[in-house]
Amino acid sequence: MITVDSVAGLRDQVTRLRQGGKRVAFVPTMGNLHAGHLRLMQEARQHAQVVVASIYLNPLQFGQDEDFDAYPRTPAHDKVALLSAGVDILFKPAEAEIYPRGHAAQTFIEVPGLSHDLCGAFRPKHFRGVATVVHRLFHMVAPDVAIFGKKDYQQWLIIRLMAADLGLPIEIVGVDTVREADGLALSSRNHYLSAVERKLAPALHETLCGLRDRVQRHGSVTTEAEEAAMESLKSHGFRPDYVSVRRQEDLAKPRPEDRRLVALAAAWLGNTRLIDNVEFES
Ligand code: PAF
């Protein structure tokens, strides 16, 4: 695995490795890699002969009172994990490579509508920060395909919309969430949970599965069902931001005839904000 920290170095290496018409897959990450990330690397290998991963903790996608400073940074562990996952190039850009004119002067990419719904309603600049950094990284790596985890379902759809709207010739692939044995979705933020909170945390996934079952039983999505799921989360010690059932393709509110749905939630357990979702057919 080659590690590069400059855009010039990255472009040299990608150009060299893609010779002979090889396809390049890209997996952007913020580091603190776990089995969910490694699953993304495996998926990348299914789509291309060259796999590029990036580690960059993007300040622009964190709100002022959010956990940018506390976010776990584990560079030595990450390097070993990527090496064992067979990644070809690790791009670890310095801050000045990503935002050379500083954060305040940066041109933003913003996908309208969806960026302000669901998680975007609670984290107003989050998806603008995500779309901006992913667009920068896409421009630098110039991949044929990019891989995203579906735990961040809304992020995955926003990146798909951005790529379509800007005509980027990049296939955007979503990969199913990897879970602990008790159902908790793998996330770097799980490290923040106390032992007591960790025991409560699987209730997020269980509640979404319960909501899915209720919608499937009744054949329709109701506000009562979403509210009951919110109450269930509260009874397990969560402070939910939202629980909502949406259409898979665009996260719009479902019409009665829509069958491909996804139940999504974001909820706080102590100081940790967890998100999860369950796709289903009704
Ligand atoms: O999902 C993440 O880890 C981040 O939002 C991403 C896509 C790497 C952008 O910083």
Image (spheres, rainbow, N blue to C red):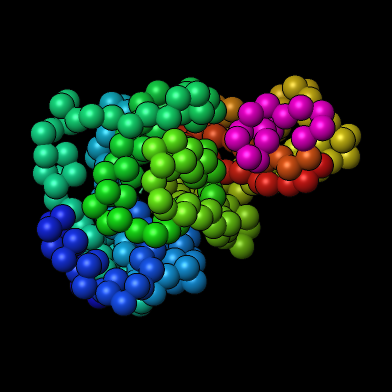
The magenta region covers 245-258
At x 19%, y 61%, the residue is 11
Q: Is residue 192 above or below residue 115?
A: below
Q: In this view, does 191 lie above or below 223?
A: below
Q: Position of residue 190 (x, y in %)?
A: 45, 50
Instruction: Check the picture and name the quadrant holding the N terminus.
Output: bottom left
Give the number of marks: 0
Q: Which of 255 and 232 is in front in this view?
A: 255
Q: Position of residue 159 (x, y in %)?
A: 44, 42
Toward the right, the furthest residue is 218
Q: Position of residue 125 (x, y in %)?
A: 36, 26
At x 39%, y 63%, the residue is 25
At x 61%, y 33%, the residue is 251
Q: In this view, does 220 lie to the left or right of 231?
A: right
At x 24%, y 66%, the residue is 14
Residue 192 in sight from this viewpoint: no
Q: Main secondary structure of the magenta part?
A: loop
Q: Nearer the viewer, residue 122 or 146?
A: 146
Instruction: Check the picture and name the quadrant holding the C terminus.
Output: top right
Kindly indicate the quadrant of the structure image that contains residue 5.
bottom left
Kindly indicate the quadrant of the structure image that contains residue 50.
bottom left
Q: Where is residue 106 in the image (x, y as percent from the top left)?
A: 19, 30
